[in-house]
Amino acid sequence: MAEGLLNTIFGDSYDAYSAGVEPTIVSPYAIEVMKELGIDISDHRSKSIEEFRDKTFDYVVTVCDNAKESCPFFPGKKVLHKSFEDPGAADGSIEEILDDFREIRDNIKSWIEETFKN
């Protein structure tokens, strides 16, 4: 969700790439709640950080405590960390799970807007 949000909101200034320490799938719930904002991430895929080992970044951003602790060193000008709950751990009815994804989506969006504004 963070990749889609950053590229949509500040795509003129940043190119965001998302990867995980343990890539899985892009959650259909994430796809659904992003679609509600008019952002299509259905073609995104879960990528390993190993794909980016030789790439140089201006910023490396981690968004969960596990990633902060497990992320290898990437040479960059700035490392940012913001912890968000993993909505993939949500349970309950479909609507309750979607509500959890919406809450995290909105929290990520607010943080991105504040952190990366020019």
Image: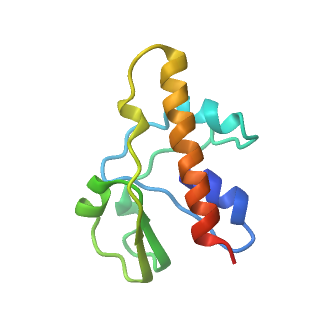
Task: Specify the quadrant of the image occupied by residue 3.
Answer: bottom right
Q: Quadrant of residue 23?
A: top left
Query: Could you tell me which quadrant the C terminus lies in?
Result: bottom right
* Foreground of the two, 38 or 108: 108
**Residue plotted at (60% across, 34% down):** 31
Figure quadrant of residue 69: bottom left
Q: Which residue is most to the bottom?
A: 77
Of residues 53 and 57, the one nearer the viewer is: 57
Which residue is pictured at 44% across the width and 66% down the height?
61
Residue 83 x %, y %: 38, 55
**72 relative position to 86: left or right:** left
Q: Position of residue 36 (x, y in %)?
A: 71, 34
Q: How many marks?
A: 0
- Which residue is pictured at 44% across the width and 81% down the height? 78
**How are the colours assigned in the image?**
rainbow
In the picture as drawn, the residue positioned furthest to the left comes out as 69
Left or right relative to 63: residue 1: right
Is residue 61 placed above or below 88 in the rendered structure? below
Residue 26 in the image, given as x and y percentages of width and height: 49, 38
Q: Is residue 117 above or below residue 27?
A: below
Residue drawn where x is 31% and y is 47% of the image: 22
Residue found at the very far top of the displayed protein: 93
Instruction: Left or right? Give the position of 38 relative to 99.
Output: right
x and y, in percent, of residue 114 in the image: 61, 66
